[in-house]
Image (cartoon, rainbow, N blue to C red):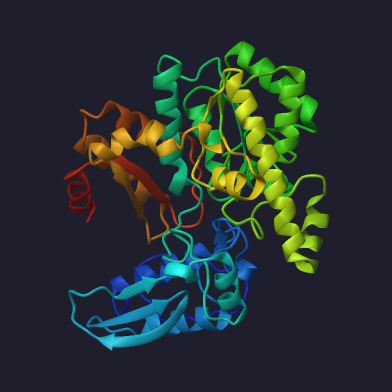
């Protein structure tokens, strides 16, 4: 292993994390941060690397390209007794600390009290003073759709246990959104042996999920998609079908045809009514043009669409669909901005399905092979199976992930472990 290689200089555009054992930084702690930062901007991983967007519509790894260059530069110079401070995607200080301190401390999008509004955030963002970091974009630990995959898998497994006897075989789950978070849904359903029918307004997102094997098929139109989904349900296949459409279009078609899905949720980017969610009644190109021309009108149309979206979900719930929110603020916007008073009549996924796991101390645990060698992850898979043979559900997940999950960027894995188990696994790996 060499001490350091020649300095790494980045230019605006897609990036790729270094592989192998040669260091670009002073130690492996800083090198790990560097590689994970660049991995977030790998086109195999992030949604829009050209604009530093990793996932979630606007979740960024760095505030701008100047900040990104300075992050890379500082990490390469960082000593093992120093700490870099990053504030909303911009490095603001390098402090002399000590070898046991973090190499990097990050704080993103922290607004408090009356200033914690989208309007104030966007005002600061336009001035270049803030960015939206999502959960793992601005913290540089996004590993592609797999990062949310097991949580989504666990959710649908809990749905299966609660309503369908422990398996989704012979059931139809309907949802919308194939972005960085929502893209985990179709594979999560098929890993639980069910049929998933999912729509997205962006054909590029559908193509990306097909390419990375998170989605099995694409239908030409809504009728073809619905017919294929019903056929697969009848045959008890485990298959996912994507179609390019707005969520309200898909749900309206189901209501009009008298088709009630067994499970229903949504993972569109409704948390951001301007830069994430797309109103119905217009093409994606028309929506993007309106977004630039008249932000207020765009938001109004988004809220109106969210109202219709939630009303359709409530209608399908009344017909028997197991319906739940997936944490994207869709219900709140429908209630507050579109006047849907009973928007919260269907529950959120955490209290409905995931809270019992949290009560046991279970939670997500992820790791990446900085070497870039997939065999390193396969060895850690074997280690997990060896360490926790009594956890049959975990073993099933690891085997399924090993067989069916395509790596994006640096090879990685995620699983849910309990109290005392994460440190046990970490010690075994290292």
| x then y, percent, for residue 351 | 38, 36
Total tally of numbered discs in the picture = 0
Residue toward you, 7 or 329: 329
Residue in the image at 44% along x and 25% along y? 159
| x then y, percent, for residue 417 | 26, 41
Q: Is residue 149 above or below residue 193?
A: below
Q: Farthest top residue?
A: 234
Q: From the viewer's perspective, is 269 left or right of 285?
A: left
Indicate the quadrant where residue 198 lies: top right
| x then y, percent, for residue 338 | 66, 46
Indicate the quadrant where residue 200 lies: top right
Q: From the viewer's perspective, is 401 left or right of 300?
A: left
Indicate the quadrant where residue 46 lies: bottom right
Residue in the image at 45% along x and 54% along y? 143
Pick the quarter of the image with the N terminus: bottom left
Residue in the image at 38% along x and 61% along y? 371
Residue 331 visible within the image:
yes
Residue toward you, 166 or 345: 345
Pick the quarter of the image with the C terminus: bottom left
Q: Is residue 39 above or below residue 74?
A: above
Q: Is residue 313 above or below residue 148?
A: above
Residue toward you, 341 or 5: 341
Residue in the image at 30% along x and 33% along y? 356
| x then y, percent, for residue 292 | 76, 67
Residue toward you, 416 or 56: 56
Residue 206 visible within the image:
no
Q: From the viewer's perspective, is 80 left or right of 352?
A: left
């Amino acid at each position: 292993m060499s001490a350091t290689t020649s300095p790494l200089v980045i230019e605006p555009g897609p990036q790729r994390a270094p592989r192998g054992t040669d260091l670009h930084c002073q130690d492996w702690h800083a090198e790990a941060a560097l590689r994970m930062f660049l991995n977030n901007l790998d086109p195999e991983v992030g949604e829009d690397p050209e604009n530093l967007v990793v996932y979630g519509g606007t979740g960024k790894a760095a505030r701008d390209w100047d900040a990104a260059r300075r992050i890379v530069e500082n990490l390469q110079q960082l000593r093992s007794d120093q700490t870099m401070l990053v504030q909303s995607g911009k490095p603001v200080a390098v402090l002399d600390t000590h070898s046991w301190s973090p190499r990097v401390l990050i704080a993103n999008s922290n607004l408090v009290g009356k200033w914690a509004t989208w309007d104030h955030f966007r005002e600061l963002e336009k001035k270049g003073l803030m960015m939206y970091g999502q959960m793992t974009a601005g913290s540089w630990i996004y590993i592609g759709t797999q990062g949310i995959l097991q949580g989504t898998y666990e959710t649908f497994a809990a749905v299966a246990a609660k309503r369908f006897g422990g398996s989704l075989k012979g059931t139809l789950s309907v949802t919308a959104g194939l972005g960085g978070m929502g893209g985990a849904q179709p594979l999560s359903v098929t890993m639980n042996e069910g049929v998933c029918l999912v729509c997205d307004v962006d054909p590029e997102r559908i193509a990306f999920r097909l390419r990375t094997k998170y989605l099995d098929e694409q239908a030409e139109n809504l009728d073809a998609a619905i017919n294929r989904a019903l056929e697969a349900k009848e045959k008890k296949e485990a298959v996912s079908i994507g179609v390019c459409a707005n969520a309200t279009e898909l749900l309206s078609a189901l209501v009009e045809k008298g088709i009630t899905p067994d499970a229903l949720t949504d993972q569109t980017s409704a948390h951001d009514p301007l830069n994430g969610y797309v109103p119905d009644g217009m093409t994606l190109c028309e929506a993007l043009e309106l977004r630039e021309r008249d932000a207020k009108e765009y938001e109004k149309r988004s809220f109106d669409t969210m109202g219709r979206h939630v009303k359709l979900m409530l209608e399908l719930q009344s017909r028997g669909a197991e319906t739940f929110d997936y944490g994207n603020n869709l219900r709140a916007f429908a209630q507050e901005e579109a006047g849907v008073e009973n928007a919260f009549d269907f529950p959120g996924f955490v209290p409905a399905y995931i809270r019992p796991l949290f009560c046991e101390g279970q939670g997500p645990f992820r790791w990446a092979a900085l070497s870039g060698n997939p065999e390193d992850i396969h060895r850690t898979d074997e280690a997990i199976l060896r360490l926790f043979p009594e956890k049959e559900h975990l073993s099933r997940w690891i085997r399924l992930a090993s067989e069916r999950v395509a790596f994006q960027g640096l090879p990685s894995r995620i699983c849910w472990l309990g109290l005392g188990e994460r440190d046990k696994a970490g010690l075994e790996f290292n």
